Amino acid sequence: MTYQRIAGPNPAPMVKLRVFRPNAEEDLVETTDALIDSGADVSFLPKDIPAKIILPSVGSFVVGDINSNSRESPAFYPGVKIEGWNVVIPAAKFGEWNGPFAILGRNVLKHIAVLLDGPAGTLSIR
């Protein structure tokens, strides 16, 4: 669990995230990088992951961005685990987006304690 350069000059806190259908962790699993984003209300998966693990959508919701633009996103409730941390995070709503990594927003972060150490470029979870 380290900081990675994803855009711009400043590295960001990233983890590896295992994504799977609830109650089917050993079935179809996708692993993706995930940005720790305490500014995001909800979490997001890269658009291709739900189809790869045959994860059904459960309705939809409106997503707003920092520019006050809004769009509708399917809602998913996947099983997720942060690699190196052997706990399945309780069910949380994820939307989808066109980015190459997942985004862990406050709806997931409220279940874990994250310590960010910017000068060292590391993070720890408990």
Image (spheres, rainbow, N blue to C red):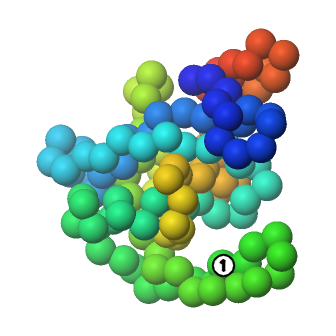
Position of residue 59 measured from the top left corner of the image (x, y, whole percent): 44, 85
Can the viewer see residue 113 in this picture?
no
Question: In this image, 86 relative to 28: left or right?
Answer: right
Position of residue 46 measured from the top left corner of the image (x, y, whole percent): 46, 60
Asked if 117 appears above or below 20 in the picture, the reply is: above
107 or 5, nearer to the observer: 5
53 or 121, nearer to the observer: 121
Query: Which amino acid, mark 1?
Result: Val
126 or 100, nearer to the observer: 100
Asked if 66 appears above or below 68 in the picture, the reply is: above
Question: In this image, 25 relative to 48: left or right?
Answer: left
Position of residue 21 measured from the top left corner of the image (x, y, whole percent): 28, 57
Query: What residue appears at the point 18 percent right and 41 percent down from the top-left corner?
Result: 26
Query: What residue appears at the point 83 percent right and 81 percent down from the top-left corner?
Result: 68
Residue under label 1, please give it. Answer: 63
All told, the count of numbered labels is: 1
Query: What residue appears at the point 66 percent right and 54 percent down from the top-left corner?
Result: 105
Query: What residue appears at the point 64 percent right and 63 percent down from the top-left corner?
Result: 42
- Determine the secondary structure under disc 1: strand
Image quarter in which the C terminus is found: top right
